[in-house]
Image (cartoon, rainbow, N blue to C red):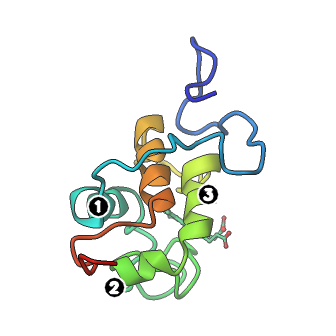
Amino acid sequence: MLLANGIGACSPDMPLPVDPGDGSAMTTGECGDLTFENFGQQFFQNYCLRCHSEDLVGDLARTDAPVGINFNTLEGVREFTNRIRLRAGELGDMPPTILPVPRPSEAERRMLIEWIDCNTPSDTDPVDS
Ligand code: HEC
């Protein structure tokens, strides 16, 4: 169930196959070496900060992204990992599908989910946690 059934598999703006609800549909079950620094930061920069940035004030500038949901920092991301996982990872409707903005590939969405399921590792984490 990892890559949807072959040809015509999900384009980035379509929902992925139905999730059994236990999170297993989208996980590889393994933690690689994805970190905020080598993956997350650039991901949020590329696909999210045009709306979810603390530098943007007002609904127009934020394209209606809710106030207080900002992904400039690891802390900002960690506050919303469940919703980020759901919307940008599983459902793929963040960024909003009706808007002509860059969006992550399916592979990038899988990396996002893996990074989140591995507890959003960062180079700044204490070594012996
Ligand atoms: C073009 C603007 C735009 C971009 C880019 C964008 N968002 Fe959003 N985001 C919104 C808007 C508007 C809402 C509020 C409406 C909604 O929830 O659908 C929102 C809401 C959210 C929420 C709250 C959802 C909830 O369930 O409460 C999360 C989490 C989120 N976005 C994550 C992301 C992530 C992660 C990215 C990058 C992969 C991203 N967004 C990119 C506009 C954007």
**Label 2 vs label 1: CA separation?**
24 Å
Q: Is residue 92 visible?
A: no
Q: Is mark 3 within 8 Å of ligand 1?
A: yes
Comes first in the chain, label 1 or label 3: 1
At label 1, the amino acid type is Thr
Determine whether the residue tagged by mark 3 lies in a helix, strand or loop. helix
In the depicted structure, whether residue 122 falls above or below residue 33: below
Residue 27 relative to residue 55: left or right: right
Residue tagged 2: 55
Viewport quadrant of the N terminus: top right
Determine whether the residue tagged by mark 2 lies in a helix, strand or loop. loop
Instruction: Give residue 35's mark.
Output: 1
Q: Position of residue 37 (x, y in %)?
A: 22, 65
Q: Single out the mark in the foreground, 2 or 1.
A: 1
Q: Position of residue 79 (x, y in %)?
A: 52, 81
Q: Residue at x 33, y 61 (%)?
A: 40
Q: CB of mark 3 within 8 Å of CB of mark 2?
A: no
Q: Residue at x 52, y 37 (%)?
A: 12
Instruction: Give residue 87's mark.
Output: 3
In terms of image quadrants, where is residue 30?
A: top left
Q: Single out the mark in the foreground, 3 or 2.
A: 3
Q: Is residue 29 visible?
A: yes
**Label 3 vs label 2: CA separation?**
22 Å
Q: Residue at x 40, y 75 (%)?
A: 71
**Label 1 vs label 3: CA separation?**
20 Å
At label 3, the amino acid type is Arg
